[in-house]
Structure formats: structure tokens, C-alpha cells
Image (tube, helix red, strand yellow):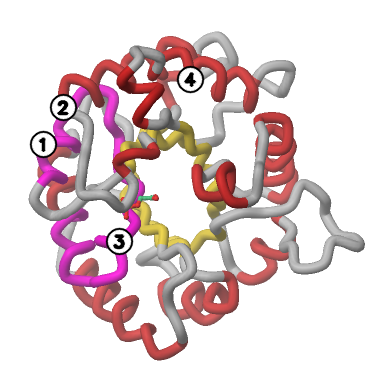
């Protein structure tokens, strides 16, 4: 890790998990109690599980939502507000995940408003960005990052209370990842660009997401300007997730 930020290892369960999967959370809690170190650990389960998970994991694992609506309340059938996530026990929320951008047609303007909603409610947002395979292959990855960062952050408060996850779309759920130098390049670039929008860009944790697993975690988490990971599939199994947390602990500054 390039600086002394406390790493964040976040698990995104997506639309996976029933009450019956509570055992995985309990195994994570038990595993984390035996580890000492300076890492924040977060699980973002499906919304119906948030209240129970937040109560069970209090003080060990933070619980977050996977999305929120920009408004505080109103006639928006099926949506969940940032205030409702807080009320349920969440302290984080994922904003602008590529699956939301793709399947729910979320654009930068909506994502900017969702970030504001998270801050209004007192949640710590994790802003996701990343390029498609064709954008990577045509050399546009950094342009996409610039566009998405500007879309989410320009003309807004210079708040630094958030994290950013670089998640190349082609790496999500595919088992493929960028090379370590490619990840390092994007993270260094994001750090520089964030300085244009935020007063304390150096305090913003930059996560990598996309096929992080116990085998590749140490290499990725050891890179400059990588301050954690956003983990999908490998966060569903406590054993795998705990190995990724262990990799973060060994990469963390002492
Ligand atoms: P993955 O998902 O780890 O399963 O690739 C990451 C994400 O979408 O956040």
C-alpha cells in the first residue's frame, strides 16, 4: 500500500444470500476475532438481511447497502433510501456499481445525486467506476475513469468522505484481472484526478474490484495507491474472504 490509509476489504454479496447463509457471516466474525490488525471489513448483503447482519456483526464487520435512491422518501416503488439503510443498521453504501449502470441504466448524473444522498444520511459511499473490455483494448481506460469521476464529483461539495472502487467491467465475475502495472496505473491516475474534486484526496481509500480471490489478493493489495478490495464472488464464502482479509493485513502499513 502506498500510504498509511487503513485498508478496507468489502464484500458485495449482490443478489445472493438468504437467512440460511447467516453461518458465513458468523464464521467471518469468528475468524476476524482471532486476527489482530488494522483493516476495516465490510459486508454488503441483500437489503432484507441488513438489520440482522448489522446486529450480529456490530463492532467487527460493518454492514452496507448495495445501492440507494437519491430521495429521502416518496413514491418510488421498490426503492430504498439512504436514510432507510442507516435505519436498518448500514454504515456504508455502494454507489454506481457497473451492474446498476448496465441493468438499471444509471448515468453519472443519477450517481452524483446518489452520492449526495449517502452523505446526507451519514453513510460512507463506495463509488464504483471502470471500463469495458473494448474501452480497455482501444486505450480509453483512463478517459473512462476521468469521465466517471467528473460525472460523479464535479460541481458538488469537496467532500472526501468516500472510497472509490476501480472495477474494470470485463474483470467482474470472469476470473480475469488487469495486470498489476495496469491496476497501479489506474489507481495512481485516480489519486491525481481526485485532487481536482476533493480537498483531501490523499485520505480517500482506493479499492480494486473484479475477480479478487485468495490467490491474487496479496499481489493486488501490495500495490501503490491500492487501499483495499471490493470482492464479489469470493466474499460469499467465509474461508475465502478471510484469506483476502489476511492478505490485506500483511500488506497494511505498520
Ligand atoms: P467479483 O465481483 O469479485 O465476483 O468479480 C466484484 C464486484 O462486482 O464488486
Q: Is mark 3 within 8 Å of ligand 1?
A: yes
Whether the residues at callouts 3 and 2 have beta carbons within 8 Å, the answer is no
N-term-proximal mark, 3 vs 2: 2
Quadrant where the image shows the N terminus: top left
N-term-proximal mark, 1 vs 4: 4
Whether the residues at callouts 2 and 1 have beta carbons within 8 Å, the answer is yes
The image's mark for residue 219 is 1
N-term-proximal mark, 3 vs 4: 4
Q: Is mark 1 within 8 Å of ligand 1?
A: no
- Given residues 91 and 229, the one toward you in this image is 229
Q: Secondary structure at mark 3?
A: helix
Residue 180 quadrant:
top left
Distance CA(mark 3)–CA(mark 1): 18 Å
Q: Is residue 252 above or below residue 4?
A: below
Question: How many neighbours does mark 1 have within 10 angstroms: few (below 14), some (14-19), or many (20 or more)?
Answer: few
| Residue tagged 2 | 180
> Image point 56% across, 15% down: which residue?
199
Residue 159 rendering spot, x and y as whole percentages: 62, 26
The image's mark for residue 144 is 4
- Given residues 249 and 221, the one toward you in this image is 221
Question: How many neighbours does mark 2 have within 10 angstroms: few (below 14), some (14-19), or many (20 or more)?
Answer: some
Distance CA(mark 2)–CA(mark 1): 7 Å
> Image point 45% across, 34% down: which residue?
164
Q: Does residue 39 appear to the left or right of 78 in the view shown? A: left
Distance CA(mark 3)–CA(mark 4): 25 Å
Question: How many neighbours does mark 4 have within 10 angstroms: few (below 14), some (14-19), or many (20 or more)?
Answer: some
| Residue tagged 3 | 233
Amino acid at each position: 500500500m502506498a500510504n498509511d490509509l487503513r485498508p478496507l476489504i468489502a464484500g458485495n454479496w449482490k443478489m445472493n444470500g438468504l437467512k440460511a447463509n447467516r453461518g458465513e457471516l458468523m464464521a467471518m466474525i469468528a475468524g476476524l476475532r482471532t486476527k489482530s490488525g488494522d483493516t476495516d471489513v465490510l459486508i454488503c448483503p441483500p437489503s432484507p438481511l441488513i438489520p440482522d447482519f448489522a446486529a450480529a456483526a456490530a463492532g467487527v464487520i460493518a454492514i452496507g447497502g448495495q445501492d440507494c435512491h437519491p430521495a429521502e422518501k416518496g413514491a418510488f416503488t421498490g426503492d430504498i433510501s439512504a436514510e432507510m439503510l442507516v435505519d436498518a443498521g448500514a454504515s456504508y453504501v455502494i454507489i454506481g456499481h457497473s451492474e446498476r449502470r448496465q441493468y438499471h441504466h444509471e448515468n453519472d448524473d443519477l450517481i452524483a445525486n446518489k452520492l449526495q444522498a449517502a452523505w446526507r444520511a451519514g453513510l460512507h459511499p463506495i463509488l464504483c467506476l471502470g471500463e469495458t473490455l473494448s474501452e480497455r483494448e482501444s486505450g480509453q481506460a483512463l478517459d473512462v475513469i476521468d469521465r466517471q469521476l467528473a460525472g460523479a464529483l464535479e460541481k458538488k461539495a469537496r467532500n472526501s468522505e468516500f472510497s472509490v472502487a476501480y472495477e474494470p467491467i470485463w474483470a467482474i465475475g470472469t476470473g480475469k484481472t488487469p495486470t498489476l502495472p495496469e491496476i497501479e496505473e489506474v489507481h495512481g491516475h485516480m489519486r491525481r484526478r481526485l485532487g481536482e474534486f476533493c480537498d483531501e484526496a490523499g485520505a480517500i481509500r482506493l479499492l480494486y474490484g473484479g475477480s479478487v480471490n485468495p490467490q491474487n489478493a496479496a499481489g493486488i493489495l501490495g500495490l501503490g495507491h491500492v487501499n483495499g478490495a471490493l470482492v464479489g464472488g469470493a466474499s460469499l464464502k467465509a474461508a475465502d474472504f478471510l484469506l483476502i482479509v489476511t492478505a490485506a493485513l500483511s500488506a497494511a502499513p505498520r
